Image: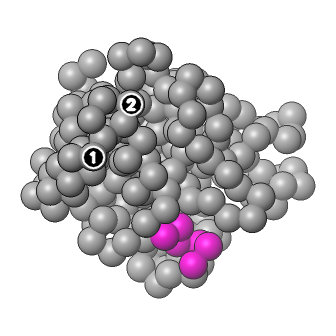
């Protein structure tokens, strides 16, 4: 479980701004479930999804997502993992493979999280950000993710990873604009716990 609590380059839960935000969110959370809910709702509702808002900055590192207030789903999942870890809650990254336009190919990865809750074990949550047709909620033990699978080639990968996939980091760090990231969204047909 220690790897799901550790700070790292992209999930920098030891950054002072992350620690301060995590402490503020924990003040009203109380139980692990309450703290997880507050962290989830903060990232879902207060951090803009880059594509939805056509923000100009591309973020990857959790502290940059917090500072800029924006990120793709992957970057938002890095921030949520960092806030949860800063509050002592084991957290990892999960992925789905989804149709970009809901009509088959092309496909891309979608980033979300899992948190270890003492009452429920690993619980997946999706802080992508709600909009018309997207209603992700925190209602353990039931999952209510942003996107249901609709195509036979879509995938719901069960692995809970401690670190982001290299292909995700590459997409967020090698492109300077939100449009460029969108034009090069990462994809994978298989993901294992050791990916």
Quadrant housing residue 84? top left
Q: In which quarter of the image is the N terminus?
A: top left
**Crowd rating for badge 1 (residues with CA inside 10 Å; few <14, some 14–19, many 20+):** few
Horizontal and vertical percent position of residue 74: 48, 53
Q: Which colour scheme is used?
A: one colour
Identify the element where label 2 is drawn.
helix
Measured along the vertical axis of the image, is residue 10 above or below residue 91? below
Q: Residue at x 64, y 41 (%)?
A: 145
Question: Start and end of the magenta stretch?
Answer: 48-53
Front residue of this view, candidates 120 and 5: 120
Front residue of this view, candidates 100 and 166: 100
First in sequence, mark 1 or 2: give its number.
1
Horizontal and vertical percent position of residue 180: 56, 75
Identify the element where label 1 is drawn.
loop
Viewer can see residue 169: no
Image mark for residue 33: 2
Q: Secondary structure of the magenta portion, mostly? A: helix
The residue that mark 1 highlights is 28
Measured along the vertical axis of the image, is residue 157 above or below residue 147? above
Horizontal and vertical percent position of residue 123: 49, 26
């Amino acid at each position: 479980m220690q790897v799901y609590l550790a700070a790292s380059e992209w999930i920098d839960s030891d950054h002072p701004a992350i620690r301060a935000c995590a402490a503020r969110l924990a003040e009203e959370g109380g139980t692990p479930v309450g703290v997880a809910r507050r962290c989830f709702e903060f990232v879902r509702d207060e951090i803009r999804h880059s594509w939805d808002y056509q923000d100009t900055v591309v973020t990857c590192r959790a502290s940059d997502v917090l500072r800029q207030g924006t990120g793709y789903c992957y970057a938002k999942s890095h921030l949520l993992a960092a806030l949860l870890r800063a509050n002592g809650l084991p957290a990892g990254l999960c992925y789905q493979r989804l149709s970009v336009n809901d009509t088959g190919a092309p496909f891309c990865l979608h980033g979300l999280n899992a948190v270890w809750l003492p009452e429920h074990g690993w619980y997946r949550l999706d802080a992508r950000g709600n909009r018309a047709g997207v209603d992700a909620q925190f209602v353990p033990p039931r999952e209510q993710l942003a996107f249901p699978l609709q195509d036979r080639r879509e995938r719901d990968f069960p692995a809970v990873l401690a670190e982001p996939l290299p292909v995700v980091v590459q997409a967020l760090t090698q492109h300077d604009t939100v449009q460029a990231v969108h034009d090069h969204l990462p994809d994978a047909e298989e993901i294992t716990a050791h990916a």
